[in-house]
Every structure is written in C-alpha cells, then in structure tokens.
Amino acid sequence: MGFEEIKNGIYFIGASVNRKGLDCNPYLIIDNEEAVLFDPGSTLDFEIVLENLEALIDLNMIKYIVVHHQDPDVCASVPLYEKMGLKFKVVTSWRSMTLTQYYGIESDFYILEENGYSLTLESGRELSFLQTPYLHFPGAFVTYDAQSRILFSSDLFGAFSFNWTVYADEEYMGKMLTFHEHYMPSNTVLRPVMEMLLTYDIEIIMPQHGSIINKDVKKYINALRTLECGSLLSPVKKSLKEAGGYVHLYNDVLKRLLTLYPHEEVLSVFSNVEGMEIEENEILKYSGSPDAAWNSIFDEIREEKGMTWIMVIEPLVRTLCATYDVEMPQAMDSLLHSVQLENEKLIEANKSLQSTINTVNEKLIKCEITGLYNESFFKSLMLEELSNEDWRDVGAVAVIELDDFSKYKLKYGAEEEKNLLNNVAYLLKEAFGESAVFKMDATDFALYIKSMEKNAIIDKIEKIRVDISKSSLILGNITVTVGLAFNDELNLDDTSLDLTVQSYIDLGLSRLNVAKQKGKNCLCYCGENLEGAESSAYVLIADYDETNLGVLSTFIKDIGVEVIQAKDGVEAYHLAHEKLPFMIVSEINLPKMDGFVLRERLNSDSRTKDIEFMYLSYMKDETTVNRAVELGVYHYLQKPYLLSELIGIIKRSVKGRM
C-alpha cells in the first residue's frame, strides 16, 4: 500500500510491511510550503517511504523530522535522507539526541527542552510536545497538533498485529493491550500520562506501530489508564468464582489470541484441547479437571505454535494468575523458569510486603504511599471529636495542596512523585507531629492542629510553607498552598455532625481556592484574606538617608502615589504588614535589619511575599546582585541613580495594577 491522507494535509506514508507482528508508521504534515516528517522509520523501509514522499512533495519542503525516541525502527533512516542532500532539523529531546547521534546524524537538532516543548511553523501552526517519561524511554514524548486535533503518539497506543489494517478495527483493543503489557513499565507510569491526555481535545491518534485510532479515542485512553503491566504486578485481587470460574480465564486467553492471530489458527489450537466445547468464538464449557484444562491449553499452544505465541500471551496470563490466585500454566512456567529464578527473592519479598500492608483495615484507613491516615479516617476522627468534646476543644483544620503537582509528576516520573509525597509528609510530621497529618483525596494533605493559639498556628504554617519550598529533600522546586479554618467558625446549626464536619473541611477548601486564585504558594486563613491581602496604593521607602527619603517622596507623590517612610529595616517590616504597599524601595544597608533580611522575612509571609521590591543602594556588585535575584528582586539601582528611571519603574508598576 502507498500513502493515505488521514486528514487535510496529514498523511500516512508507511511501507505497510509486517515484520513479525510489528508495523512501523511514518507520518507527514504538509503545511503550505513546509513539511514535517514524523518518525521516518528504519533503513528497511526507507525506499518505500521515500517513494511515497516523492509522490506527495518536493523533498526540499521537509524542514523538520520529529524523532519521538531513539530506537532504530523510528529513526535509523535519517542519515539516508541527509545523504540525498536534504536540509532539515531533527526535533527530539536531549536524552534521545545523545543516542540518535550514533546513527551518524549530522543535521542540527531542535531540542525540546531549549524551545519550550513547542514548534511554530511559518504559517503560525503550533505543534506541542508532551512529555511521556519512561513510556518506554526516559526522554519519550508525543506530539499534539491542535489545528487537526491529532496526537502523534509514538509507541503509546501501538499494537502487535499479524493482520494489520490502516484504521483500528474491533479487535484492535486486544492488540494494543498486548503491546503495552510487553513494553510499558507499570501502571503508575502510564496512569498520569493518560490522565493528562484526557484533558486534550483529541480526534485521532496516530501511533508509530499498529493502526490509526479514529473512533472512540477516549475508550482507548481509559483502557491504558487502568492497564496493569510491568514485571512487578500488584493488581486488585478478584474472586475467580464470582468472575465465572475457569471458563472466564479460558475465554480471556482465547479472545486475546483471536485479536492477534488468524481466527482459524487460534480455534484449531483450542479445538484440540480435550473436553473443550466452543461455539461462535466462545468457550461454553469444559469437562474434567479445570487445572488440567488450563495446562492443556498452553501445552497445545506450545506444541502447535511454539515459543512466539507463548511469549506474546505471557503478560496477560501472568496478570490473570496474579488477579485470581491461579498457578501459572506448566508449559509457560518451564519456558520462563530462568526469569523466575532470577526474580524469585524479589517476588517473595514483594508478596510478603503486600500481605502485610494490604490488610482490610490498612486499605480502608491508610494511604499506601505515605502511610498517613486517609480522608475517610480523618472525617471519622472529626466526628468522634465533635461527639465527645466541647466544640471549643476541636482543633484547627488546614488543607494543603502541592502547587503544579501534575507538571512535577510528568517532569520527574512516578517514582519521584512518591518520593515527593513521602518527603512532604515527613516535613509536616516533623513540624506538627505524626498524628496531626492526613492524606486527602480532594487535596493533597490536611492538618488537624490542637492546643495552639491562632497566631501560633498561622506562624507555624507559614514557616513550614517556606521550609518545604527550600527543602533539600525535594528534587526540583515545589511550593504549597494552604487554606486554614478555625474551630470558632464551625457551623453548629447543621442538621447532623456529618454536615458539620464536611462544612468545616469545605471552609478550609474554599480558602485554599482563594489562595490559589491569588497566585499559589501562600496561606489563606480568614474571610478578609481576599481583600485584605490586596496591596494598597502606597510605596514604602526604606532608607537611613533623610535627604533621599524627602526627595524620593516628593517626586513619587507628584505622580499621584502615596508614600510611607521607614528609617530602618524593623520599621519597614512592620509598616509593610500594616499598610501592604504595592512596592517597597529599599536601601540595603539599613539599620537594625538590612535590606536582604527584610526581603527574606517578607517572603516568608503570605500577605507580603508578592509585594514588588526594588533595591536602591550605594552597594552594588556581582555578589549583591546575585543575592537580590535569589530573593526574587529584579529591580536594583545604584546610587547615584537616574530619578527618571526609578519613577518610570514605579509608573509601570502602577499601570500594571490598573
């Protein structure tokens, strides 16, 4: 088969050569006088792909070749296009670039990390590159074209297929699941990426292997979202009897094989199993021992079809056995014996651990990642507190959200996601005690704080907010946003204690939302926070030089802005909290508290951390400038200064607040 137009200007240009169940699919976007080639393929397919390209475009239109990862089936042919004299950029991640260069690629690389994970063509069309780490390579990514609503999905949504079709047919789901069971590391890696893709408007998925999905796209995304895969499986246990007994297992294996291989070959194998009754591609019943029939199926597969069929179906069988507590078939067990020996100790240790932590009680009341009591337990605790105590003795409730957590998970992967949750849980427990910290569903964490005054609670939460953002335990940068509610705000008029507890938690959540609307990385703890934290129309000038204070105040007032003055750092700190100016202009060498400490302390308070800050000082060198940048101060003028420049900065800030 030659090329095929999938949508206006977007083509499948593959060779359609099935190599032991695996097809490779290059694609092409033609956008006016530019063309983008996706995953051009291996040297084996080069001549056919080239023929398709030449039938569609002048090859010099190819300005970019997108390489989703470094495997030879994706990009080994790139040097062959270079030898034809074509000039293009290779679009890929830096991890893939470090390996693809060994194919002898000489073209310039367009590195995603250096270009904001996007590419804009001359027409203005933008291609977005979405990270899919460890699926199945650390630097893997996919491409989304918003104009066509097409996802070029690389290995994701690919499939094994011994009866290939351009578009996914009714049997494609089984082919796709088999492929992912073999090549994807685990559900914990797949799930967050699939949840991300569900937020995009995707009409068509074009994978590197298998068939193009042009119908029911979300069905396939959700199927991978819940797929258990990888070598260390821990699926939810199910009752084989309730599922339908061994016939259910037999049919799962039969149906999967029917999606992969010609029906007559599959049915021939099962027909040779003694006592098996089959009608319309379904096993109705069997006679004899269920264990014997289970083993006979795989004996027949091994005898008639050999190692290939056994290995292709092995991940599904392993998942079924783990789910329903069934022994692996002897034929498969013997073939995989060496692998099982290698992992025996690890598997046994994992089983032992799972049997310990997966008791019914633990599942109900604890988070498996952090070990913290969960939201259900937290609500039960609150009910008990209100039932047994005067409401005045009930503690304060704080709800905590990790800012931009989904981006963090995509950037660092599933394992680092667990590390982050555990490390934040550790910091919270260190600050408030283990019994005060809970893992929530609606947000990330909650605190239940007793026997502390309001101001002490506020100060302590502000401190832990800053400590988390600076912690060396956490990879990269992470901040938290907090909503806080106090016991004297409890709605005791609710018709039940359940409603009282829920309304108390909802109050904390509503304040969390206020804090998020204000830019995150802050604490909201009272109804006035939304208005009270808004900066007022003041500029605060902090300087020991009275002459400079007077001159600056006069000129700033002339542009219609009120001025407040402070002659030392301590006075400036208190005025900042009292007046909440929209800007502070500060000397560095202030008495009592220097300008650096002043800024650092203001950064530690949600009410003052977002006040715009400017340094105006005789002291200015590389060390002080670097310190200013670390504190988030980007306006730094040296005395003597140009008054027009300073007034211009203030005017721009005033205009930005309008």
Image (cartoon, rainbow, N blue to C red):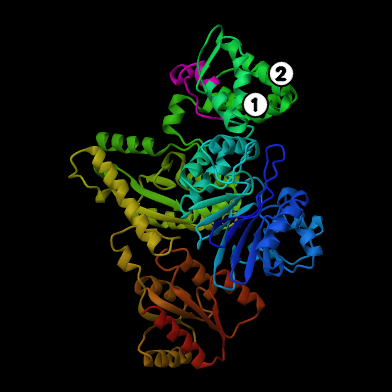
Q: What is the number of the mark on residue 586?
A: none
Frontmost residue, 241 versus 166: 166
Give the percent coordinates (x, y) of residue 180. Answer: 61, 39
Q: Which residue, given by chain and number where applicable, does mark 1 sit on?
A: 347
Tell which tag, 2 or 1, sits nearer the viewer: 2
Q: What is the number of the mark on residue 303?
A: 2
Tell me if residue 570 comes above or below residue 103 in the rendering: below
Which residue is rendered at x = 72% and y = 23% of the image?
306
Frontmost residue, 653 versus 269: 269
The first of marks 2 and 1 along the sequence is 2
Give the percent coordinates (x, y) of residue 421. Answer: 52, 45
Frontmost residue, 265 versus 172: 265
Which quadrant is home to the C terminus? Answer: bottom left
Residue 234 shows in the view: yes
Cα separation, mark 2 vs mark 1, equals 29 Å
Tell me if residue 289 comes above or below residue 449 in the rendering: above
Q: Amino acid at mark 1?
A: Ile
Q: Which residues are magenta?
A: 234-250
Tell me if residue 472 comes above or below residue 629 in the rendering: above
Label 2 residue SS = helix
Which residue is rendered at x = 53% and y = 56% of the image?
150
Q: Magenta stretch containing residue 265, yes or no?
A: no
Q: Magenta stretch containing residue 241, yes or no?
A: yes
Label 1 residue SS = helix
How packed mark 2 is, by other alpha carbons closer than 10 Å (few <14, some 14-19, many 20 or more), is: few
Give the percent coordinates (x, y) of residue 72. Answer: 75, 49
